[in-house]
Image (cartoon, coloured by chain):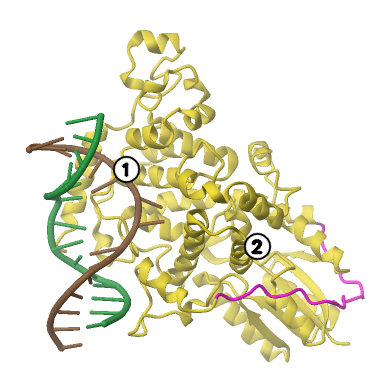
Chain colours: A yellow, B brown, C green
Amino acid sequence: METAIVWFRRDLRVEDNPALAAAVESGFSILPVFVWAPEDEGKWAPGSASKWWLHHALIRLRKQLQQRGLSLLLRKGHLQQELDSIIESSAAKAIFWNRRYEPDIIRRDAQLKEHFKESGLKVSSHNSALLFEPWTVATGEGKAYKVFTPFSKALARNQTPEPVAIPARIQPFEARTHSVELEALNLLPKIPWTSGIQTFWAADSQSAKDWLEGFLDESLVRYHSRRDIPGELSTSRLSPYLAWGELGPRQVRAALQNCAAGKGRETFDREVLWREFAYHVLYNFPKTPEQPLQSRFNEFPWKPDSELLRRWQKGLTGYPIVDAGMRQLWQTGWMHNRIRMVVASFLVKHLLQPWQQGAAWFWDTLVDADLASNTLGWQWAGGCGADAAPYFRIFNPILQGEKFDSNGYYVRHYLPELHRLPDNYIHKPWEAPAQVLENAGINLGESYPMPVVDLKAGRDRALKAWEELKGS
DNA sequence: TTTTGAGTTGTTCGA
DNA sequence: GTCGAACAACTCAAA
């Protein structure tokens, strides 16, 4: 029996894995491989938080493979060298993988494919990450979509693809091949800053499927009404599982079909389609991780300021809802979706910092960092992307706080220094009378910062800046 | 080719 | 306190 390598990348699952299924189908014995080679990932190698997640995702993958008699081969170093060496020592005749869509990775994979073909290998790539390949969806004119609604209507005209079944019998590759220990990949940080992440996720024990089931059972019915409240855990928090492919959109949709129909199901399904749209835009506009989709924004008068950026990053802006969000990100590797919009709007509009700076920070601190979604989100906030927010839509951090965190639960959780401040001042501590602050044990400017910018002035400055772009 | 309707997530102002 | 309009025009996508 000939051997095929199944090269795992961002598809760290056994179920609904078309590359694995195809390799088995073609009659190969299977050698599953993961290579840690960040320098071969181009500009967007995984950040620190993503690496932490990856470490645990690999443990979960290894376990799933073991249950089918397969043992995961780990390597690190130069990608092509390592794969070549595995091919040589295993005498593999084929390599199967699932596609990725980041521009640098597409280029890299194309080169590898060429290289392997020249070496006489069978090379086979598949789709595990998307409902539909980005090049198969197009407008009547054959162009890429730039607006979500018509894109989602176009998807609705197609049949939703079913998850790919696990092959009944998998023949493992038996001979010994050299594998490094998981710890040797050095994915975990040297300084142990991950205890907050650990508690928030309990990711060691929860498989992606269990996590999905838990969400669908407990939260889907109230998803529509409660998903905007950051102090509740009413969103799915599936994003890191999706980012590393521990779960695919086909599986999510199939599971959704078994749930009671309703607004919750509808709203959540749309979010899955937004992810699809993000990949569609990234694939068709590959420069967007670095450059605005609307080129007139190349001239935008940003006011880069490293001190302002630092205060935003650390959660020291003096606006509680913003600071709570930034601290949630720092502590848990994740931020609630609504608060992502609030902090992004604040950085880009009130502070006039380039959206690329925010995207870079998110990239390094999010466990769910995903180039397509991160790029779409930040260009949306900057008003320069596909289906972006109109320039005059500027989130007011006080109003957003009062509207979505009215009892201050979220803010108090991540800003314990404000714990004793009454509800009516919790989103604007600088307006509290001296006596109220004193009773709450708050010394503004010491225990919690004064606002870094005046909201009205910041808003007016942003409107003026966007005004400058008009007509250009 | 031209026309037409529509477009994730808000805020502020004035009646 | 509540409500609707203004914010600005432009681009997209389909008919």
Look at the image and say whether residue A227 sits in the magenta stretch: no
Look at the image and say whether residue A178 sits in the magenta stretch: yes
Circle number at residue A245: none
Chain under callout 1 = A
Q: Residue at x 53, y 61 (%)?
A: A44
Residue A209 position (above or below residue A448): below
B14 or A256: which is nearer to us? Answer: A256
- Residue A275 is situated, as x and y percent measured from the top left of the image, at 49, 63
> Contact, CB < 8 Å: mark 1 with mark 2?
no
Task: Provide the residue designation for mark 1.
Answer: A395
Q: Residue at x 48, y 65 (%)?
A: A273
- Residue A470 is situated, as x and y percent measured from the top left of the image, at 16, 59
**Mark 2 is on which residue type?**
Leu
Residue range corresponding to the magenta coloring = A160-181
Answer yes or no: is residue A416 visible: yes
**Mark 1 is on which residue type?**
Phe
A53 or A251: which is nearer to us? Answer: A251
Q: Secondary structure at mark 1?
A: loop
Answer yes or no: is residue A285 visible: no
Circle number at residue A247: 2
